[in-house]
Amino acid sequence: MELTGGLAGRLQDYKYTPRSVSYLALNPGDLIEFSYNDSVRHGIVLGVKRNTGGFFISDRFTPLQCVLLCDSLEDSTFWDLLNNMYMKPSIATYANAKAIPSLTVVNPRTGNAYVEKFRTLNVSNLSDIVRVRNLNLDE
């Protein structure tokens, strides 16, 4: 399994292990690349107050996965996020993401704070999920 989107470019100088997984195997702190409505995206799974695992069933019985999209984050903000939350399930929450200063900065292109890239994704539209493991951020 290979990364095919923008995440591959961001991680080109690092060693890592990509693994194809189901949404049921995801945990907060996981860095993932996935297809959503036929578009390749990447992000980090976050836990939320409603469910610390990042996956939950909505009031309308729709299965949802909580992800902070990273494809449009500035590189420095992306690395800030990874340094704070990658593979740290108890820390990788929306509440903690809002506390990372670089995520609360307003993106000049959109006029929104980067932390607003948080999404609850309908898992029926998620496919080709690749989880990044063994990423050594100290290299």
Image (cartoon, grey):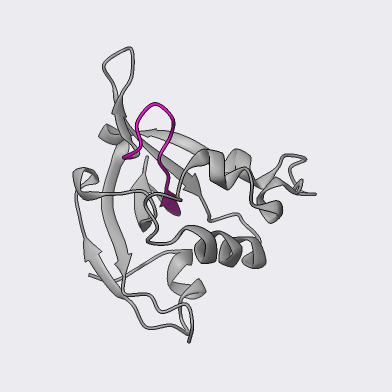
Tell me where residue 115 sits by quadrant: top right
Q: Residue furthest front?
A: 90
> Is 108 on the left-hand or right-hand side of 46?
right
Residue at 20% over, 49% down: 25
Front in this rendered view, residue 132 or 38: 132
In this view, 47 is above or below 57: below
> Is 37 on the left-hand or right-hand side of 9?
left
Residue at 43% over, 53% down: 44
Front in this rendered view, residue 137 or 42: 137
In this view, 51 is above or below 39: above
Residue at 28% over, 60% down: 130
In this view, 118 is above or below 85: above
Q: How many marks?
A: 0
- Which x, y percent locates residue 107? 74, 49
Tell me where residue 67 sits by quadrant: top left
Q: Residue furthest top?
A: 60
Q: Give the range drawn in magenta.
A: 43-53
Residue 137 among magenta residues: no
- Which x, y percent locates residue 70? 53, 54
- Which x, y percent locates residue 134? 31, 75
Image quadrant containing the N terminus: bottom left
- Which x, y percent locates residue 71? 53, 56
Tell me where residue 73 sits by quadrant: bottom right
Is the stretch drawn in magenta largely helix, strand or loop?
loop
Residue at 40% over, 58% down: 88
